[in-house]
Amino acid sequence: MNLDNNLIFFFSALGAFNSLALSIYFLFFASPRNKSNYFLGGLLVVLSIRVWKSLFFYFNPELSKIYLQIGLSACFLIGPFLFFYIKSKISKPQESNRFLNFHLLFILTLILCIGILYPYQKNITLWINYFYYIINFQWLVYIAISAFLLKRVIQKLVSKNDRLNYSEVWLVSVFFGVLIIWTAYNTASYTSYIAGALSFSFIFYLSGLLLYYKRKKEFIVLVKKEKYANVQIKETEANRLLAKIEYILINEELYKNPNITMPVLAKKISIRPQLLSQLLNNNLNKSFSQFINEYRIEEAKQLLKTKPHLKIETIAEGSGFNSNSTFYSAFKKITNTTPSKYVDKLK
């Protein structure tokens, strides 16, 4: 290989190697041990396999057909693993576990059966003319479904009023990374077959830099919070605390206080603010403001139903919002409609 090819091989292989190493971390060592980490690890594995296959085939077109079959089979799993990961991150565990398990088992069984019944080596035309396009179309379908799941996050991304939290930045990075890789592979006829592998390495390191920048600039974690970050809340204890929080919020109507803070609520239920933050983030996947705003919007909806004659300013204030703009933004974010359109639907 000449110098240019050496550089291409090195840069592409470096991203694939580091991705494979990171997948091992998420699959076997990341804490907490949950399905999200397993699905992310699986996504990185199949992306790495796809890139390695492209890389070796680019520099050795006579590569054994079994490696081509493994690479394309891994490609068939990229879209599903992206969907599984995003679904597991934004849904409550009990809502998605059974569905995702059955879904994954079906896809793995399908890949195994096709690989045995129609091996690449004996069905080259079938794989090139049909399976290849089916795999890429299926990949795109899962990207579209994942985009739908991330609809609210993507809306925040283009909005000037909302900022993404660290978890949302990570989800968006993974999603757009997979989308760009799909685009690179499916436009390779206009660029180069190696473009997919190169784009993977580029996105891998760019995402790392982006997340590092966000953590440094916007998501600095307090030392006290770090102290309790690894304390795991048992499910029974978490349910007890959430029930207690709901009881206090509703009966004392704390959410109507526009100046309610996490320390105030934590004091009410006799736990540390850091533990309350962990409870909301890990068990509900919500920030404190999002959690409180959901109670406020429910109050606003009741006022709109029972007292439609009230001005919006009065409803916003009575629900716990300190400004109309904050009320409108929160209402649309949670209900996907405006207060006026919500009232029209009630008529």
Image (cartoon, rainbow, N blue to C red):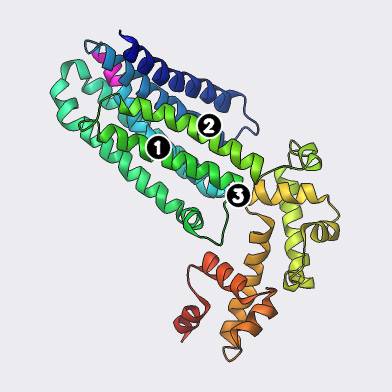
Q: Is residue 270 above or below residue 106?
A: below
The image quadrant of residue 223 is top right
Main secondary structure of the magenta stretch: helix
Residue sitting at 27 percent across and 20 percent down? 69
Tell me how far mark 3 sits from mark 2, CA to CA.
22 Å
Classify 10 Å Cα crowding around label 2: few (below 14), some (14-19), many (20 and above).
Answer: many
Mark closest to the chain's N terminus, 3 or 2: 2
Q: Position of residue 178 (x, y in %)?
A: 40, 37
Residue receiving disc 1 = 178
Q: Quadrant of the N terminus?
A: top left
Give whichever of 104, 50 is nearer the camera: 50
Q: Position of residue 203 (x, y in %)?
A: 44, 33
Looking at the rendered structure, which numbered label has been put on residue 38? 2
Give whichever of 59, 83 is nearer the camera: 59
Q: Position of residue 233 (x, y in %)?
A: 74, 42
Classify 10 Å Cα crowding around label 3: few (below 14), some (14-19), many (20 and above).
Answer: some
